[in-house]
Image (cartoon, helix red, strand yellow):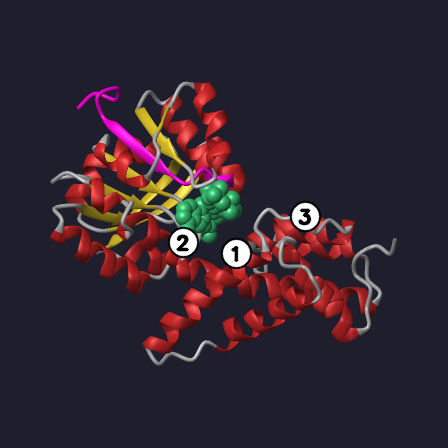
Amino acid sequence: MGKESLHVGFIGLGIMGQSMSRNLHRAGFSVTVWNRTASRMEEAKAWGVKTASSPREVAAQSDVVITMVGDTPDVREVVEGPEGVLAGARDGLILIDMSTISPEATRQMAAQAAAEGVRMLDAPVSGGDVGAREGTLSIMVGGEEETLEQVKPLLKAMGKNLVHCGPIGAGQTVKACNQIMCGLNLLGMVEALSFAKKAGVDLETMIEVTTQGAAGSWALTNLAPRVIKGDLDPGFSVRFQQKDLRIVLEEADRMDLPLLGTAQVNQLLRSVQAYGGEEDGTQALVQVMERLGRVQVTPQE
Ligand code: NAP
């Protein structure tokens, strides 16, 4: 099927969805969008995409529907609700959920979708707002390989590293692994900065040399330089990291798997929330270390 004749529906024009739907449009696909807050569709309208009045209407006009909303209940609402995708879907529709949600709920939703003749893939992403804007997201896909083959050109318009991880839910499971490691690398980074500061070594020097060695991580490369400048603005917010760690800890609970480090990061970020830092970037974890250790890592105002 040619790009213009493949009708793609896109639900959720948040920080990520706005850029991702735009990249689909730029790549030549025929795109129809819907967003709960209607004003957010104005910008998309200006690029020339169609808008719809509900997820149900999006589905009725589409061959493939992508959802990029918030948490598990949000996806369930836009997919299974009375005005949801399944209510408007034709036989053969492909549904791709790209939000980060529970693997277990994903499997349940896929079963419900299959009963309506809809094939579902989970395709959560990593790479943040910058990756979404530049079309360089890493995409972790779960579901039937044959279904993935059909939508590959579309996913490639939004990301560059596209990996089939296994059956439905496997993309979300790999994303959960990603979030475990992001959380622990974050904690390692703020602990090392606190240690360095208290011991009196130069923070920039410590970051520079350790970034090149075995301790290197995304958090060290990208977040540590922001921390020492006192920049706590979000690339990825504490609120979203906590959502993702909750998903991880719920799955671990279901599997009887103790995750000691992840649970600790979750509790420490709760302290950031208690002090009003819910919308700060995850690097705000440094403030917990500053309070616990009576050490000032960020510059004093
Ligand atoms: P966001 O800016 O907060 O946008 C969320 C979008 O979902 C908005 O369009 C919102 O609509 C919509 N939404 C939320 N709940 C809804 C509901 N119940 N019904 C209908 N629409 C609903 O979030 P984002 O940063 O784009 O993130 C979207 C997803 O990507 C999340 O699952 C997140 O974990 C994941 N993710 C984000 C990043 C990142 O760096 N931001 C990176 C990787 C993955 P309204 O406009 O009406 O509020």
- Whether ligand 1 has any atom under 8 Å from the Cβ at mark 1 is answered as yes
Q: Quadrant of the N terminus?
A: top left
Please check the rendered image and state whether residue 58 is part of the magenta-colored stretch, yes or no: no
Which residues are drawn in magenta?
Answer: 1-16
User: Mark 2 is on which residue type?
Assistant: Thr
Q: Earlier in the sequence, mark 3 or mark 1?
A: 3
Q: Which of marks 2 and 3 is nearer the N terminus?
A: 2
Q: Earlier in the sequence, mark 2 or mark 1?
A: 2
Q: Position of residue 178 (x, y in %)?
A: 44, 58
- Residue 226 in the image: above or below residue 38: below
CA gap between label 2 and label 3 equals 21 Å
The quadrant in which residue 256 appears is bottom left
Q: Which residue, given by chain and number where applicable, does mark 2 sit on?
A: 100
Q: Residue 240 carries which label?
A: 1
> Quick check: marks 2 and 1 in contact, CB under 8 Å?
yes
Left or right of residue 228, residue 103 in this image: left
Left or right of residue 79, residue 68 in this image: right
CA gap between label 2 and label 1 equals 9 Å
- Whether ligand 1 has any atom under 8 Å from the Cβ at mark 2 is answered as yes
- Residue 200 in the image: above or below residue 254: above
Q: Which mark is residue 88?
A: none
Q: Which residue, given by chain and number where applicable, does mark 3 sit on?
A: 233
Residue at figure coordinates x 56%, y 58% from the top left = 239
User: Mark 1 is on which residue type?
Assistant: Phe
Q: Position of residue 257 (x, y in %)?
A: 38, 78
